[in-house]
Image (spheres, rainbow, N blue to C red):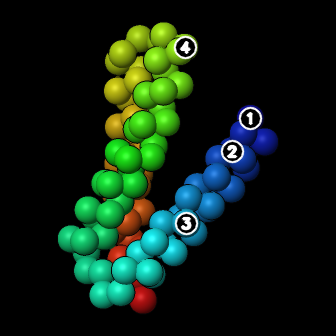
Amino acid sequence: MGAKLIVTLVCNLIAAIVLARVIHQLHGVDLLRGLKIGAGVGVGFCAIALTMTYLWQSPPRSLWAIDTGYHIVGCIIMGAILSVWR
């Protein structure tokens, strides 16, 4: 259990660093734009990757919706925090 938590933390830190670099490259990002960037990353990368994986694994659609929603919301929150963090 501990190893899974550490790997999850490292993966989230990597995602935050990458999203911070994207936001940094787009100068003058405000909160609304940060939310939109986070949503775009969440849908464009996380949701698409999970959809491809779940397509082949065939789990229940409700599980896909929960997992995908979790990652999209996480990316939106990350985008909001990183956009206002100076």
Residue 3 position within the rendered picture, expressed as x and y whole percent measured from the top left: 78, 42
For residue 18, the mark is 3
Please tell me which residue is depicted at 38% across the width and 47% down the height of the picture.
Answer: 44
Residue behind mark 4 = 57
- The residue closer to the viewer here, 47 or 67, is 47
Please tell me which residue is depicted at 42% across the width and 20% down the height of the picture.
Answer: 63
Residue behind mark 2 = 5
Q: Amino acid at mark 3?
A: Val
Between disc 3 and disc 2, the foreground one is: 3
> Can you say which quadrant of the picture contains the N terminus?
top right
Between disc 1 and disc 4, the foreground one is: 4
Residue 82 position within the rendered picture, expressed as x and y whole percent measured from the top left: 42, 74
- Mark 1 or mark 3: whose residue is earlier in sequence: 1
Q: Amino acid at mark 2?
A: Leu
Residues under labels 1 and 3: Cα distance?
26 Å
Mark 1 and mark 2 residues within 8 Å of each other at the beta carbon: yes
Left or right placement of residue 83 versus residue 49 in this view: left
Mark 1 and mark 3 residues within 8 Å of each other at the beta carbon: no
For residue 83, the mark is none
Task: Tally the numbered discs.
Answer: 4
Q: Amino acid at mark 1?
A: Met
- Mark 1 or mark 4: whose residue is earlier in sequence: 1
- Mark 2 or mark 4: whose residue is earlier in sequence: 2
Residues under labels 3 and 2: Cα distance?
20 Å
Label 1 element class: loop
- Mark 3 or mark 2: whose residue is earlier in sequence: 2
For residue 1, the mark is 1
